[in-house]
Amino acid sequence: MLRHRAFALFWASRVFSTVAFQMQAVAIGWQVYGLTGSAFALGLVGLAQFVPALALAFVVGPVADRYDRRMIVRACQAVEGLAIAGLAVAWFTGGLGIAPIFAAIFLIGCARAFEAPTLQALLPGLVPAGLLPRALAWSSTASQSAIICGPAVGGLLYAISPGTVYAVSASLFLVSCLLIGLIRLERVPPRREPVTLASVFAGVAFIRSRPAVLGAISLDLFAVLLGGATALLPIFAHDILAIGPWGLGLLRSAPAVGALSMSLILGQMPLKSHVGRIMFAAVAVFGLATIVFALSTSFWLSLGALVVLGAADSISVVIRLSLVQLETPDEMRGRVSAVNFIFIGTSNQLGEFESGLTAGWFGAVPAALIGGIGTLLVVLLWMRAFPSLAKRDRLESPAQ
């Protein structure tokens, strides 16, 4: 896959930007909990990213379908880099408190609201349609590799100072921005349609017309929403497992280790049959791994549970993204990806808020346990509600 120059640049950009995001996430999570000692404050970190993503959702899609997707991604990554650079400057000048941190999180949330759906819409234009499932697996490999390295490096650099983490993170965002600028598209950019109310909500209508796609997206939504134990990792690291920032970095990296391993397998051996049943099984394993993590008091068992969780999540992600991208015309990919981002991307942040809120009420362990059990119940309900997804055999539409 890396022999395709455009995809290779895209892949490298994903590595740098994801490493940058994960590094600053470790620093922000540890700082917010250290400054406040509050699980609810950790939940607010997710909410501060969710609100702009939700508010901008129906603006993002039409923008991604009307304008150069590369320029949109570059602008977003530049904004993220500058926001993190601001935190670095504030730290080194002694002015970094809770307010500047949340202001930067909100700004990053606004930029990611445009960046993530646009990246999803950009990828199919970089490779032939027949290679898309493999490209998605390779793209997931880039992200998961970065998620492994990012938190660990962020935890180590945090020992020097939070400002160091922020400065390195900002630099990586700017490198990623430059790489996106080198991409040359072989396909014609999507035709610009007049902006109407119908065109803005076309992504919603399209997904509703595809029961298997709607089922896959909503299944992942509730699994991520309920199983957001990763938002509570600073609490588990500090209060339950008694490990420091470096240990927190390892815990944050663990799901990516499992996801990377599974992505490499899927990149070499793409799923060819029974994809619906495989997706439901993967989400069920995700829920079971969350339960094991919630009940564990051993660092190594917790680490292993998170590895399994990440591997299971990788399977469902590749299936969902393949279903969405293979069934969506290029001129609608921005709007459909924007709706997909509402369901999945923002559910990560909303899941963090839900986990923080639940942990504030009941404690971290019950909150994670409730999430895992809830995920298993969702799997059972969705198998009955979306039989077309459960019976789906191949990623390609039967009509194709």
Image (spheres, rainbow, N blue to C red):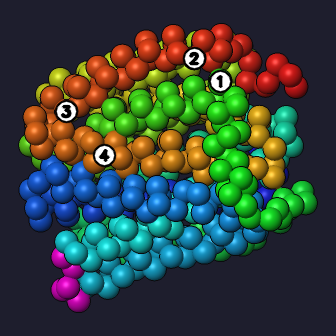
Q: Quadrant of residue 34?
A: bottom left
Neighbour tally class for label 1: few under 14, some 14-19, many 20 plus, Cα within 10 Å: many
Query: For residue 179: magenta?
Result: no
The percent position of residue 5, horizontal first and vertical second, equals 81, 57
Could one spot residue 49 in this view of the protein? yes
Q: Amino acid at mark 2?
A: Phe
Question: Can you tell which of label 2 and label 3 is closer to the viewer?
Answer: 2
Relative side of 337 to 89, left or right: right
> Mark 4 falls on what kind of element?
helix
> Mark 3 falls on what kind of element?
helix
Residue topped by disc 4: 352
Gap between marks 1 and 2 measured at Cα? 7 Å
> Could you say which disc has been placed on residue 367 in the image?
3
Residue topped by disc 2: 386
Which mark sits nearer the N-terminus, 2 or 3? 3
Which mark sits nearer the N-terminus, 4 or 3? 4
Gap between marks 3 and 1 measured at Cα? 30 Å
Q: Amino acid at mark 3?
A: Ala
Which mark sits nearer the N-terminus, 4 or 1? 1
> Mark 1 falls on what kind of element?
helix
Relative side of 298 to 385, left or right: left
Residue range in magenta is 93-97
Neighbour tally class for label 3: few under 14, some 14-19, many 20 plus, Cα within 10 Å: many
Gap between marks 2 and 4 measured at Cα? 27 Å
The percent position of residue 220, horizontal first and vertical second, equals 49, 31
Frontmost residue, 255 versus 337: 337
